[in-house]
Image: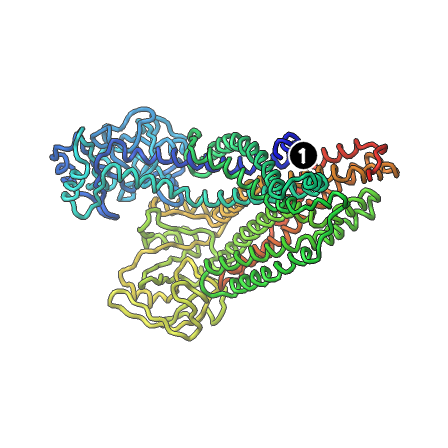
Amino acid sequence: MLRISLPGLRLQRLVPTLLAVVLAVAFVAGTLIYRDTAEATLYDEYARAARNVGVALTARSGARLAPSTVDTMRADPAYSAVDGRMAERLPLLDSRGRLVTDLGEPGYGVNTGTAAALRPYDVHSGRLPERDGEAALDTRSAQRLGVAVGGTITVVDAAEARRSLLVVGLVDATGFGGSGTSTVVLTDAELTRLTGATGYREVVGRLRTGADATAARTRAQAADPTARARTGEQLRRDLAREASGQLGGLFVGIALFALVAALVAGFVIVNTFTILMAQRLRETALLRCVGAGRGQVFRLVLAEAVVVGLLGSLCGTALGLLVAYGLSRLSPALGLPEGGVVLGAVPLLAGPALGVLVTVGAAVVPALRAARVRPVAALRAAVPETAARRRLPVVLAVPAAAAGTALTVAGVLGTGGALPAMTLVMLGGIGNFAALLLLSPRLAGPAVRVLGWVPARLFGVPAKMAVANAARNPARTAATTATLVIGVALMAGGGTVAATVNRTAEAQLNAAFPVDFLLTPAVPGSLVPAAVAGEVRAAGFPVAAPVRQGWSGSVLVGTVDPAAFRPKVTAGRLEDLRAGTAIVPAASDALGSRPVGSRIDLAAGDRRLSLTVAATVQSSSLVGDVIVSDADFAALFPGVTDDAMVLVRAPSADARARLDAALEAHPLVQVADLAQVRDERNAAIDQLVGVIAALLGFALVIAVIGIGNTLSLSVVERTAEIALVRALGLTRGQLRATLLAEALLMALAGALGGVAFGVPYGWLLTIAGFGAVDPLLSVPILRLSLFVALAAAAAVLAAVLPARRAARTTNLVVPQA
């Protein structure tokens, strides 16, 4: 059977399917290769901390190891070298005197130590500092500040005084704790003088050849029972887990998009083999007539799928190397180090395996249909579809839609928290989308007729024929457009969620805090000095409202000047806030729902306070879970005199320069320009949506290939029909226009269907996530319109070759009996 059939396998008809497999496998293999590359590169950076380390003794959070710990470990004959590692907050200033931060955090100062082999950084150029006033700076910060060896940097010491240091070298360093913050290397004595710290974060030792690492670790633990002792191998494993953890969320997202690409490719393959089996109906029936069994026909179709899947997988894996290389070049934009491509066994095996499995799995249903063809079908023009087969999708769609709708309603109305509610909405969306796919053959025809109504009246015969061709086989049209529906629905839903979150957050921020600047402490855990608010007001800022905060168990209690806090009220009045009353969110994770008039009991140490809810607001704020009067806050937290933050309103356009001048004596107070924060948030959301669009672009390219594939196979199927209409006077240009219009209609039907499904579900998902907050719907109309237009243009481009092939059909070809 295979000897007869495989030599006749017409790969030219399967080239578009082959291309779909290539792209899907390239995306999957490329992301797997990039994961290995990013993990290896990131681990190499982290591994500096474990290089040559046989035993490490690490202080618990917030504590330090005594200097004598180094002497104790040096006395152990198991070590050939022992060194102590210091890492203390040491804020770095740029040329304008502003803090250099990473995600709002200032950098660290680290010591040179005494053992070169145990340093957690490498000298890139120059040398390490040898005396006071000298420093080495990490290369990332040096590039950011435009500083080279021989230049100077300014740091802020523990007394908030500015200190200038001469840069004598540059180092490659990951940053303390694996962060991207600045790293300034100083002599031990200089670091102690600037920060006031005398102990070590970690003491590490290099073992002599043959020394027992476990026994040495036990002895090191005895040196300080409160610290954590690890062998070098344990330290390396911990660093590897920490490196992998930074990539977890990123690759979960990429894996989801890879799954979408594979799913879309599966749709294309199913559609292709379905059409091919329909075209080869008589051929299959004749094979049955000459003795081929059902199992042989089934194996024949699967053998074709294996050939296509294997070829596509091998080509896709090779292309995946280029995808991985491109992603690695973009790593710095993702906050990851750039490195050479790392090839592992898993991606090289997983890509081909996935391609073959997807192709064969997608071909199973067409293969089963082909195997059920009876020999008598060779005498029929077509096999009629039974009524039961027509009813089956509807029978399956009804419970899927009912379950999906119930889950969606439960998620939107649910009060069990944002994450469970969003999960219910997403599960409901999957159910309703499954119902949509099942019903799509009944919806595709009417949708195409509606979209083609105007063109059919404006552009005459080609447009009318395109509408008729797309609508007369709705099952094929539905299967072809389903791939576009998936990709565009995800794009529309994600874009709507991002735009809505952005618009709602901005409206909430603008309404609740009618200010322009937010002053916060640069060092986590510290406070803004109480004098700052008064100094800012004295500099000409009428509103400089300090915010003080304290914890009552898990409830954050805050107080603020009402002039700088105007949230949307859901019940009660803000003006009723006075001693003995409080303002709370309408729904809070810490408090639950507390109506106006209810009581709240707070405690701090042995102090107790019972308050009456005077008003509820729409959302929790920067101030706290409970907002109280100044008098009540002072009674509950008498020791809190400094501020968690200061809210400042700008009186004029040059306010930022004046504010910086007013804060010159307080270099560790950060200034957040809320307008700039909004712009950065908008840019971040735009970048996120752009990344989503780029990743979904793979799926959409595959979907567009599917449209071209369907038309190409349809041209072969309709050869006699095309010859007939050409004989009746249809010109080649009109025929090409007909097929291009058909592709355009299918693309628009799929893209608009995706928008119609994705936007409402993006909106419902946002409602579920926001809880008591009323989100403000924002649909990225321009971006979605561009996406739809690109999908339509790409579909028309994909139809050019099938249209040219059809136009070459001569009108001398007559329909065969």
Q: Residue furthest front?
A: 291
User: To which quarter of the image does residue 83 belong?
Assistant: top left
Q: Total label count?
A: 1
Residue nearest the viewer, comparing 96 with 461 = 461
Image coordinates of residue 325 in percent, x first then y, are 48, 31
The answer to whether residue 334 of the structure is visible from this angle is yes
Q: Quadrant of the N terminus?
A: top right
**Where does label 1 land, which residue?**
13
Of 805 and 677, the residue lying toward us = 805
Q: State the image quarter where residue 59 is shown.
A: top left
Q: Residue at x 47, y 52 (%)?
A: 516
Residue at image coords 26%, 48%: 61
Q: Residue furthest top?
A: 126
Q: Closer to the camera, 128 or 566?
A: 128
Residue 587: image x %, image y %? Answer: 45, 65
Q: Is residue 205 left or right of residue 154?
A: left
Q: Nearer the viewer, residue 804 or 511?
A: 804
Q: SS at mark 1?
A: helix
- Type of amino acid under label 1: Arg
Quick one: label 1, few (<14), some, or many (20+) residues within 10 Å?
some
Picture coordinates of residue 344, whole percent (x, y): 42, 32
Q: Quadrant of residue 118?
A: top left
